[in-house]
């Protein structure tokens, strides 16, 4: 029996088809059209027949089996979501469930914000896989690297331009960049004065710059921009911190208040090179499996 495709393999297969049909400069992807047409060609007896929005009070998106004995599947998203990028990622996430999980889960899925925003496996392997597919499908790595080379010095506007190119949220674009950059950087997501979760680039992680699960929640530093909204202009700002604010080294913090999610995104840029170790051995991590839930302590 042929082994099932991985999330990355499914994304690569579809990317190859789209590149051949439309060329490399074909973004953003029309997910409803691609989901219907690709599934009809690849799985004619079990295609996606409907992609539509509706009012969904308790979840962001769903994959469901057609009712009354009809063949096929439907994708539905919450049309009360104001962010088009968030809707786009939700659609790709549900398309990933269709490709990867519909046979094992014939009743389909209902997915909330947490499952779609976070790309780790904290909420279950199937949600993690659907998000890995969505990221690779919407933001192919070769194209993203052309927009921002892996050694480039980045700022929020460069990442925002990528978010617009792929019609994804800023948080999705930042996470995609963190997955391949050689720069030392950390994304911190916070609300009400506390870190919700964080993600480090490989270079940052290996140098000891990360936030790790331990004994209790981490409070945002008093000098950090989420704690000083008066320094934000139009919901964004940038500041250079000395050592001892976020970490035991200087940090350039760029913060954006994400109104659609009601939390702040802080991108922490650290200097190149490896600082003195913060005192713990480096853990072994999967490329995507580096998100951090609430209840963290700062690794100093």
Image: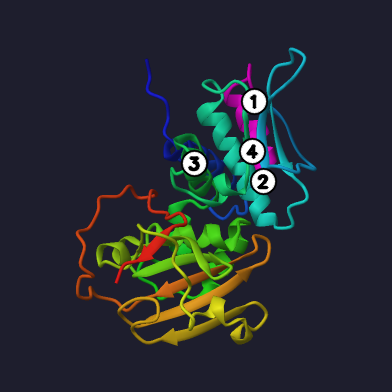
Label located before the other in sequence (3 or 4): 4
Q: CA distance from mark 4 to mark 1?
A: 10 Å
Secondary structure under badge 1? helix
Left or right: 231 in relation to 178: right
Q: Is residue 38 magenta?
A: yes
Residue at 61%, 48% in the rendered image: 113
Residue positioned most to the top: 69
Residue 299 in picture, x, y percent from top left = 31, 67
Q: Is residue 16 visible?
A: no
Q: Nearer the viewer, mark 3 or mark 1?
A: 3
Secondary structure under badge 3? loop
Residue at 54%, 20% in the rendered image: 103
Colour treatment of the image: rainbow
| Residue pointed to by mark 1 | 40
Residue 123 — which label? 3
| Residue pointed to by mark 4 | 34
Q: Nearer the viewer, mark 3 or mark 4?
A: 3
Secondary structure under badge 4? helix
| Residue pointed to by mark 2 | 30
């Amino acid at each position: 029996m042929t082994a099932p495709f991985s999330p990355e393999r499914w994304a690569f297969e579809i990317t190859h088809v789209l590149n051949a049909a439309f060329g490399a400069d074909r973004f953003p992807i029309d997910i409803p059209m691609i989901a219907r047409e690709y599934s009809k060609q690849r799985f004619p007896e079990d295609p996606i027949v409907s992609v539509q929005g509706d009012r969904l009070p308790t979840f962001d998106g769903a994959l469901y089996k057609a009712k009354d004995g009809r063949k096929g599947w439907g994708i539905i998203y919450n049309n009360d979501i104001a962010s088009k990028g968030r809707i786009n990622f939700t659609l790709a996430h549900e398309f990933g469930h269709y490709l990867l999980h519909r046979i094992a889960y014939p009743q389909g899925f209902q997915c909330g914000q947490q499952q779609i925003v976070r790309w780790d496996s904290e909420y279950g392997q199937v949600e993690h896989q659907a998000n890995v597919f969505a990221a690779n499908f919407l933001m192919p790595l070769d194209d993203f690297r052309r927009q921002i080379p892996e050694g480039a010095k980045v700022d929020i506007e460069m990442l925002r331009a990528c978010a617009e190119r792929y019609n994804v949220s800023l948080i999705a674009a930042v996470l995609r960049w963190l997955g391949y950059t050689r720069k030392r950087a950390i994304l911190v997501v916070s609300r009400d004065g506390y870190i919700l979760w964080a993600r480090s680039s490989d270079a940052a992680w290996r140098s000891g710059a990360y936030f790790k699960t331990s004994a209790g929640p981490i409070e945002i530093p008093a000098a950090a921009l989420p704690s000083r909204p008066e320094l934000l202009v139009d919901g964004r700002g940038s500041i250079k911190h000395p050592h001892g604010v976020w970490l035991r080294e200087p940090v350039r913090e760029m913060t954006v208040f994400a109104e659609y999610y009601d939390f702040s995104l802080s991108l922490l840029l650290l200097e190149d090179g490896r600082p003195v170790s913060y005192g713990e051995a480096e853990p072994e991590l999967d490329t995507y499996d580096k998100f951090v839930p609430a209840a963290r302590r700062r690794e100093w």
